[in-house]
Amino acid sequence: MIHAYKGRGTDLSGVDAFRRHKGDTGSSEFQIARLSARVTQLTAHLNEHKKDYASRRGLYAVLALRRRLLVYLERTDFPKFQKILQDLHLKPPKHNKTRR
């Protein structure tokens, strides 16, 4: 039986600053902030458990999703994109600009 990740162990204390309003869970900024918190948690876990390949695969999936959201935000709202990169200390994503 496969269990979906329930969010346990991830420090989400700094994520609320990226909400647009009280019930916001779907904005790109909020999703990127949540995924960044998850990346931090998974990276710390993998530093301790180097052979946990299932978690490593999950980390790659989270990174890919965060990258796609960053590319979307860059395309649709560049000032917010720059602000979130600065606030979360992220590098701009590498993407193929000729692709649609």
Image: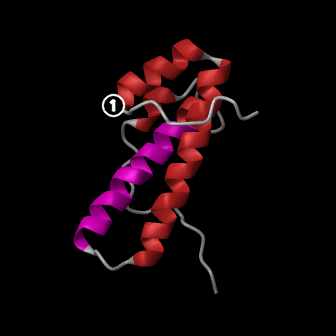
The quadrant holding residue 96 is top right
Does 44 sit left or right of 38 as displayed?
left
Kindly give the residue lying farthest to the left in the view shown: 48
Kindly give the residue lying farthest to the front in the view shown: 98
Residue 15 on image: x %, y %: 44, 37
The colour mode here is: secondary structure
Q: Which residue lies at the image location 52% right of the left edge and 22% below the top edge?
A: 81
Give the residue at mark 1.
Answer: 89
Q: Is residue 46 magenta?
A: yes
Residue 37 on image: x %, y %: 40, 47
| Above or below: residue 63 compared with residue 55 | above
Q: Main secondary structure of the magenta part?
A: helix
The quadrant holding residue 9 is bottom left
Kindly give the residue lying farthest to the right in the view shown: 100
Q: Is residue 42 magenta?
A: yes
> Quick check: can you spot residue 94?
yes
Q: Which residue lies at the image location 64% right of the left edge and 87% below the top edge?
A: 1
| Above or below: residue 29 compared with residue 49 | above
Quadrant containing the C terminus is: top right
Q: Which residue lies at the image location 67% right of the left edge and 20% below the top edge?
A: 76
Does 77 sit left or right of 87 as displayed?
right
Residue 77 on image: x %, y %: 62, 17
> Quick check: can you spot residue 21?
no
Residue 47 on image: x %, y %: 24, 66
Query: How many residues crowd mark 1 within 10 Å: few (<14), some (14–19), many (20+)?
Result: few
Magenta segment: 31-48
The quadrant holding residue 91 is top left
Kindly give the residue lying farthest to the top in the view shown: 79
Q: Which residue lies at the image location 61% right of the left edge and 26% below the top edge?
A: 73
| Above or below: residue 47 compared with residue 65 | below
Residue type at mark 1: give it: His
Looking at the rendered structure, the secondary structure element under dot 1 is loop
